Structures are given as C-alpha cells and as structure tokens.
Image: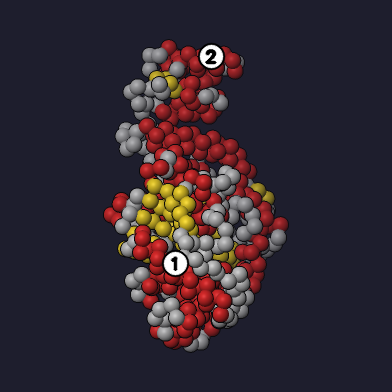
C-alpha cells in the first residue's frame, strides 16, 4: 500500500506529465516584494511551516494545523523517553500570528515531523536537531504567508484543510494521503519550490480531485477548479475541471489509484478482480539486520514499499510490500533473499516457511489452485532441498494468460456496461465469426483444436463461426489472448 506521493513516485509519466502545466492557466500576483536568495533551513521544512501556519491563519486550530508535528513529538517521546510533548506544546502555544517569535516557534515545531513521517530515518540519523531560522528565512516565510492570505482573500474562504478521502476515495493501492485546501468551488495544493510545478505535482492535485469525487463527500461535488499556488513565486496554476478529459480521469482511476474493477461473476471463472498488495514478513536476528534487509531489498523493482517493525516491539522483522499477483516479483525477491542469506533457517538448517500476508488474510484465487492458503515460501521453494517448486513455475504461464483475459473482460464491462449485466455482449456489438475462421486457417488450426483448447464442443465453435450464436465475453477475450487476435476485429462495436 502507498500514500499518494509514494504512488506517484512509482509512475512513469510522459514528458510534460499526464496533466501538463502548459494546459493550466498561470495567474501571476504582484505584491512588489522580493524574497531573499538564501535561507538557512531545508526547503521542505519551509514548505511545512508555510502550509501549517496558513492553515492556522485561515481558521484551523493550532493543534490540527500542526497535527503531524504533535504526532512526531509523541513518537519521539516514546522512543527517546524525553519531554518532547511538553516542548512542542510550549512552542505551539506561542504561535499567534506572523511575528518573528511565532515563525521561529513554528520552525522549531516542524522539526518533530520526521519522527512521524519517517521514524526509521529519524532513529538512524539521530534527528534531535531543532530548526532555528535566520533573519532572511523569517522574512521570506512572513512574505509567503502574507501572499497565502492574499490568495485566499480572492479565491477563498477556506472551508477545509488537511482533508482526507474516507470512505471510498482510497483504494487497495493508495490507502493514505491528505489534500491541502478546499474552498467553495476549488481544490488547492501549495508548493514553495523555486521552479514551476513538476509532473508529480500536477498529478498529485489531479489524484486528490478524483479521490475526492470517489469519496462521496458533498463538498467535492462542488469543485469547479483545481490548482497549485506557489507563494514563493507568487503564482497560481489552475484548470477548470470541465477541461479534464474523460480518458485522463479513467487512466488515473484504473492504472494509478487502481480502484477496484467490476467483480467477475460465476458465469466465467468464478473469480474476483483485485489489485491488492500484501507483505512478505522476514524475521531477523537483530534489528540492524532487519533494517539492512529492508534497505537493500527495497531497491528491487518488484518492491513497492519496505518497512521494519516498530523498535519498541520485541519482534525484529522486515516487511516487504508487493502486488500479490506479481509471480515474477515473488520469484525475484525470494531468489535475492536466498543469494544474500537473508532467508531465515530453522534448527535443522532448513528454510523457515515465511509468509506473504494480506490484510484480510485471504488469498486471490487467480493462482489456479497452486495455493490452498495464503502464500508461503513453501509454495515457491522446497524447504528441505532449497530448490524451486516446479509446480509453482509450471503454473506461471497459465496464470499470466488468465490474468490477461480477466483484464480484458473487466475493461470491456467497465467501458460498455456501467453496472449492467456483466459477461454479456452489448446488443449492438457483433461477434465476427468470419474473422475467427480466417485466423484459424491462417494459423493452421482446426475447429477441433480450438474446441479442445477452450474446453467447449466443436458444434459450439461452428455456431460462432456461422453466426448462429456468439460466445460470452469471457470466451471472446480468451480467443483474443490465446490466438493473438485483434479485439476490435473479433468484436465489432460500430
């Protein structure tokens, strides 16, 4: 599972991005002020200060505005057994406006964020440093805050900030993420970089908009524009939601956020479409070894996210997250762990039967009976001999074919039925039996060969070819996959 920003990092976008800046309107605000060229704290920290203080200044409580900082302080206090909670409360109580003292205390407060956002790195880097801004940084932050207030005086007021997308906005792939600001008819993200928005920034605001619509919350139904405001550049980049193409929205829904596709009914394979993610749980002898496995294995392309167990717990484990249907990925990961002696052994010197677990402890039946329970190492490797499980590898080809067929079925149903009868042709679509006959002849196949391949009677295939009947969509898509046929020529849609 991933946050919005983590998911975006996994996506390869075209040059210019899926939602290009050039397609957005650029609005320039002129306050005749210039920012100092140098700042003594990290741009990311400056961005958090500007964001949190803007939320506070537009009506959010200080505790809500600095919620992540407070959570970080609590984590740090638990791990370090110090008085971080008292310290941050003292800092927040002294934030009242955009004066020097308030800005300095805000900078100190966001120092605790790392203990919530990435406690692993905080522990590793011994992050006890408190951020103290210099005069130039304080001046720049104040100017950017003034610009934010001016922006919302024209495009506000703010009706919500730090909003989330329960209950239907998240998916099994993107399960975390919160937006910056909602106004009556706008959804806004704030950036304080020195350059124009990047493709990852525009995709982020687009994902927030789509997730908001899926959440079912009333406030998202009123959104007419989405945009990015950069108080450092004093520019806004915005686009009317009516100009967002349906193809772009569908692509983000299906391939990036990965909302569940329609469920497959018993008419075909009795399977359900899923894009779920699970985790391999790798026990380690020491916490340092767990961190080492996590850091190195996370470089594999099949790994979506890697994490270690909480240092406060007794368990010393590495968690490696990946798609449950990635058979190649499972093999690649197990091979890597084996080559680097990361697979745990029992007292007899044989492999322990480590597990790949889903949140609901169920397993996807696409594996065609290879697994009668949630995936374990024993399904992939002979634990005693240390060799690959041949049954597992033999099933791989059949699994990949079935997955491709199911993807085609789901795409057809989602495109043409919109909740109607799944598995059936639309009435106006026609099965092209003549094209099937030509392809059988071209490939040197007989009707008997095809019937055996599909598990149907010869007369059934003959009726398809003669136009006396037509197959279910599932069989039509199986024909496309197994015979490498063109879907648009086999299923005539116009």
SS at circle 2: helix
Q: Is residue 66 above or below residue 2?
A: below
Dot 2: few (<14), some (14–19), or many (≥20) neighbours within 10 Å?
Answer: few
Tell me what residue is drawn at x 51 percent, y 87 percent: 82
Identify the image quadrant of the C terminus. Answer: top left
Tell me what residue is drawn at x 53 percent, y 55 percent: 197
Q: Position of residue 313 (x, y in %)?
A: 52, 75
Residue 344, picture quadrant: bottom right
Q: Most extreme residue toward the top, as rendered? A: 466
* 2 or 1: tag closer to the N-terminus: 1
Residue to which mark 2 is pinned: 438
Q: Which mark is residue 147?
A: 1
Q: Is residue 197 left or right of residue 468?
A: right
* Residue 232 in view, yes or no: yes
Tell me what residue is drawn at x 54 percent, y 19 percent: 449
Residue 218, picture quadrant: bottom left
Q: Which mark is residue 111?
A: none
Q: Is residue 331 above or below residue 473?
A: below
Disc 2 versus disc 1: nearer the observer:
1
């Amino acid at each position: 599972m991933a946050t919005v920003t983590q998911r975006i990092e996994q996506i390869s976008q075209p040059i210019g991005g899926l939602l290009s800046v050039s397609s957005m309107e650029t609005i320039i605000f002129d306050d005749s002020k210039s920012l100092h060229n140098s700042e003594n704290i990290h741009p990311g920290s400056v961005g958090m200060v500007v964001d949190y203080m803007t939320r506070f200044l537009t009506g959010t409580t200080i505790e809500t505005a600095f919620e992540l900082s407070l959570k970080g302080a609590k984590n740090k206090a638990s791990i370090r057994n110090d008085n971080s909670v008292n310290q941050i409360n003292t800092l927040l109580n002294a934030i009242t406006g955009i004066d020097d003292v308030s800005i300095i205390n805000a900078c100190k407060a966001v120092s605790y964020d790392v203990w919530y956002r990435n406690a692993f790195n905080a522990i590793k880097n011994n992050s006890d440093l408190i951020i103290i801004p210099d005069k130039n940084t304080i001046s720049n932050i104040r100017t950017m805050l003034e610009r934010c207030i001016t922006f919302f005086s024209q495009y506000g007021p703010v009706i919500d900030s730090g909003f989330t997308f329960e209950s239907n906005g998240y998916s099994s792939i993107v399960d975390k993420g919160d937006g910056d600001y909602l106004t009556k008819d706008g959804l806004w993200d704030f950036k304080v970089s020195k350059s124009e928005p990047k493709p990852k920034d525009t995709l982020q605001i687009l994902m927030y908009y789509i997730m908001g619509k899926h959440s079912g919350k009333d406030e998202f139904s009123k959104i007419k524009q989405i945009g990015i405001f950069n108080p450092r550049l004093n520019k806004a980049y915005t686009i009317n939601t009516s100009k967002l193409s349906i193809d772009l929205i569908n692509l983000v829904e299906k391939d990036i956020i990965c909302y569940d596709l329609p469920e497959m009914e018993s008419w075909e394979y009795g399977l359900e479409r899923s894009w779920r993610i699970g985790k391999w749980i790798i026990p380690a002898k020491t916490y340092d070894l767990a961190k080492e496995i996590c850091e190195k294995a996370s470089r594999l392309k099949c790994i979506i996210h890697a994490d270690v167990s909480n240092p406060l717990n007794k368990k010393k484990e590495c968690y490696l997250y990946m798609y449950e249907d990635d058979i190649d990925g499972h093999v690649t990961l197990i091979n890597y762990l084996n080559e680097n002696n990361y697979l745990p052994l029992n007292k007899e010197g044989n492999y322990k039967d480590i597990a790949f677990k889903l949140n609901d402890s169920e397993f996807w039946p696409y594996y065609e009976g290879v697994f009668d329970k949630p995936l374990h190492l024993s399904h992939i490797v002979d634990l005693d001999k240390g060799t690959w499980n041949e049954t597992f590898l033999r099933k791989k080809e059949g699994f990949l074919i079935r997955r491709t067929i199911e993807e085609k079925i789901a795409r057809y149903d989602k495109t043409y039925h919109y909740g109607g009868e799944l598995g059936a042709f639309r009435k106006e679509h026609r099965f092209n039996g003549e094209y099937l006959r030509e392809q059988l002849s071209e490939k040197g196949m007989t009707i008997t060969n095809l019937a055996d391949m599909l598990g149907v009677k010869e007369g059934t295939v003959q009726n398809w070819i003669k136009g006396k009947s037509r197959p279910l969509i599932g069989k039509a898509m199986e024909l496309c996959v197994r015979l490498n046929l063109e879907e648009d020529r086999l299923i005539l849609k116009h």
